[in-house]
Image (tube, grey):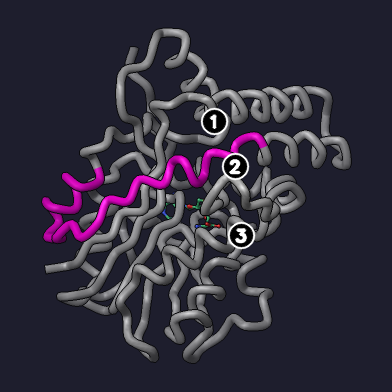
Amino acid sequence: MTEQSPSPSDVGSMYDQFSDLFTASLGDNIHLGFWPGDQDTAPLSEAADRLTDLVADRLTAAPGTEVLDVGCGNGLPTLRIAARRRVHVEGVTVSARQLRTALARPESGPGVGRAAFQLADAMALPFADGRFAGAYAIESIVHMSDRAKAVAEIARVLSPGATLVTSDFYLDGDLTPREAEILDAARRPFLLPRFPRADEYPRHMAAAGFDLIEFDDVTANIRRSHRLIADTLRQAVRRFDLTAELRTQVEASAELTERIGTLTQLRYALITARRM
Ligand code: SAH
């Protein structure tokens, strides 16, 4: 059976609709957390900031230069990276709701350590060739129907030598029919097309003129996120005035989120590449 990929506007509407719920459960980072070891007991919000910092530290953009945030969410990671690297970050999102939240941050605006935001589709970026000294995409390319096009667009707007860092899911190994069913059911409400295989991002990067610097599988470090996200979603849903249907849907998504956290084939990597 063929499956229609979600359009950028479908993805934007999904984030518009669930923005409050995500914020109530995840805080303003819409991504997983990173724990260096089993002894570490940091809460999800702190662990999610850590993942942002791991992305920031892989960039090579010099202070004062411009960096692109592909799929910037509510702008929290954007501003954290702008401050940490002392760069100016341009964030793009397909959600009008996220854009409003990001623009309301006091640190938005021109200048080093600050960020600007706009609505734009990463598969057709509204920026001139070679403009940026770096780019990153935290759990955003996974949403895109044409991931090769998104990577090629990012390559186009980067200057030679600039670094791209992606932080995202991928699949490695075969799934049983039951596992495939669970994974399909889990990704549909979040409008995720099929997950890429291990070689997909590196292939798109090579085709777009990137040199692969590092493929860092951090699955063991993010594993705890799924259960914590499921728990916080369940708690948040009780505080919201949702229709019975929506409540059931979110509770089912929480359950599936927890279950996919146990699938060893669903993996997560920080990929660093340099524009040639
Ligand atoms: N990077 C942010 C948000 C992750 S959620 C964070 O870590 O908090 C996924 C993000 O990808 C959302 O902001 C969504 O708007 C964005 N996104 C999905 N498809 C997109 C597309 N085609 N173009 C631009 N952004 C997209």
Q: CA distance from mark 1 to mark 2?
A: 8 Å
Crowding around mark 3 (Cα neighbors within 10 Å: few <14, some 14 to 19, many 20+) is many
Residue at figure coordinates x 20%, y 47% from the top left = 202
Please state which of the two labelled residues, at mark 1 or mark 3, is closer to the viewer: 1
Up the image or down, 28 lies above or below 199; here it is below
Q: Which disc number belongs to residue 132? A: none
Q: Which disc number belongs to residue 98? A: 3
In the rendered structure, are the residues bearing label 1 and label 2 in contact, judged by CB atoms less than 8 Å apart? yes
Residue at figure coordinates x 55%, y 58% from the top left = 73
The quarter of the displayed image where residue 17 is located: top right
Q: CA distance from mark 1 to mark 3?
A: 26 Å
Crowding around mark 2 (Cα neighbors within 10 Å: few <14, some 14 to 19, many 20+) is many
The answer to whether 263 appears left or right of 38 in the picture is left
Whole-percent x and y of residue 150?
29, 53
Q: Amino acid at mark 1?
A: Gly
The quarter of the displayed image where residue 157 is located: bottom left
Q: Earlier in the sequence, mark 1 or mark 3?
A: 3
Q: Amino acid at mark 3?
A: Gln
In the rendered structure, are the residues bearing label 1 and label 3 in contact, judged by CB atoms less than 8 Å apart? no
Give the magenta part as a residue range. 201-227
Q: Earlier in the sequence, mark 3 or mark 2?
A: 3
Question: Can you identify the residue that label 1 sits on?
Answer: 261
Residue at figure coordinates x 58%, y 56% from the top left = 48
- Where's the N terminus, which quadrant? top left
Disc 2 on helix, strand or loop? helix
Tell me: is circle 1 under 8 Å from ligand 1.
no
* Depth order, front residue of 128/24: 24
The answer to whether 276 appears left or right of 100 in the picture is left
Question: Can you identify the residue that label 2 sits on?
Answer: 225
Disc 3 on helix, strand or loop? helix
Up the image or down, 78 lies above or below 199; here it is below
Please state which of the two labelled residues, at mark 3 or mark 2, is closer to the viewer: 2
